[in-house]
Amino acid sequence: MKLIKLVGVYLFAKIYYVTLGEDREKGMEKLHERLAKEIYAVFIEFGGVYVKFGQEVSMMHNLIPDVYVQAMKPLQDEVREIDFEQVKRLIRHQFPNQKFEDLFMEFDEKPIAAASLAQVHRAKLVTGEDVAVKVQYHDVGSFYTGDLFIQRIATWITDKINGTNNNDQMDHMERELKRELDFLHELKNGQQAADNFAFKGDSENFYIPKFYKDYSTSNILTMEYIDGCKINNLEQLAKWKFSVDDVATILYERTSEMAFDHGFIHADPHPGNVFVRPRPGAPHKPQLVLLDHGLYAKLPDDLRHAYTKFWKCVVNKDDEGIKECCDVFQVTDHKAFTTIFMMQSYAEAMSVDSDLLKDDN
């Protein structure tokens, strides 16, 4: 049924495009608006992998029409919810030897966020700590299995048409999604990332919440509650009198440190996973808080060094250098690769007027 609906959306777009006639530009605007709504509705209905893909689309500025970016933004943290009684049953199932009341002194029935895998509730442990409890949907494992099967069929068809082979990419995606379903794996990632920053003793403007292992399982993750706003909430940043440039600089410096220094990179940094709050002890300064540590990428030293050189070559507009780096990455189309990373066309990235060369960016 999912495959039929996806094909249906594709056929609608093709037929509509053919019937546009001469007034094609105006018609394309209407087509994009209609398709964005249709695709969003399909992603919401299907959930799972499709919500994850929609989250990625919501960050593809400069690559696709903005109407799709705006349509997918709610998928960052506002998806389906399950009722509180079901949440309690799931927690009791994960902690069979403890009563719900023995774990939590307070537990808000209404989730503060809901995403593709789980929803998050604010709570207070019996020991008094304010926490956020991430509860995985009971059916998400079976949904992901079916979604991945459909993805493999679609990939096989695409490969046959284009003469390509994306089996390795599908294997990689399946491996990573299965890891993301294990919240203890997320806990381990988060602790490692926090240790990486703590090692340098310079993490006042960047924070990773504390995790509570005794209150966590493969399907339940309990972490420190963070009172903040999404990084793209410009109205709240203005109320706190935080400079957008300062916030952007912190994000740029810390994510660069992850990539070029640690070699351990958060792989899902959409705005719903990056919060800003007044820095504890210095509330006139911003502190960024990184959430959702289910997906990380590890860069071996050779790739990390090549990745560092790649960005240097992009800044210096060094086409040959970019090609050499892509050879290390085993990427044949260096222009497409750069376009994806820069979220702008290769010609724009290589232009002397590129945003990379402007002081205010």
Image (spheres, rainbow, N blue to C red):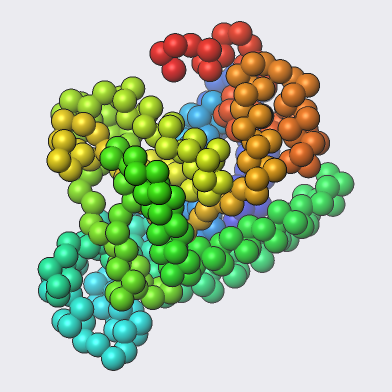
Residue 152 percent across, percent down from the top left: 71, 61
Residue 177 percent across, percent down from the top left: 56, 62
Above or below for 30 versus 295 = above
Q: Residue at x 38, y 53 (%)?
A: 194
Q: Residue at x 37, y 49 (%)?
A: 198
Residue 199 percent across, percent down from the top left: 40, 49
Q: Residue at x 28, y 40 (%)?
A: 204
Of residue 63 and residue 24, the one placed in the foreground of this image is: 63
In the picture, measured across the screen, residue 101 lies left or right of residue 184, that is left
Q: Residue at x 28, y 91 (%)?
A: 97
Of residue 160 and residue 127, the one placed in the foreground of this image is: 127
Of residue 149 and residue 289, the one placed in the foreground of this image is: 289
Q: Quadrant of the C terminus?
A: top left
In the picture, measured across the screen, residue 224 lies left or right of residue 249, that is left
- Determine if residue 72 is in view: no
Check the image and name the residue furthest to the bottom.
97
Above or below for 139 versus 247 = below
- Determine if residue 298 is in view: yes
> Image quadrant of residue 220?
bottom left
Above or below for 111 versus 228 = below
Of residue 279 and residue 66, the one placed in the foreground of this image is: 279
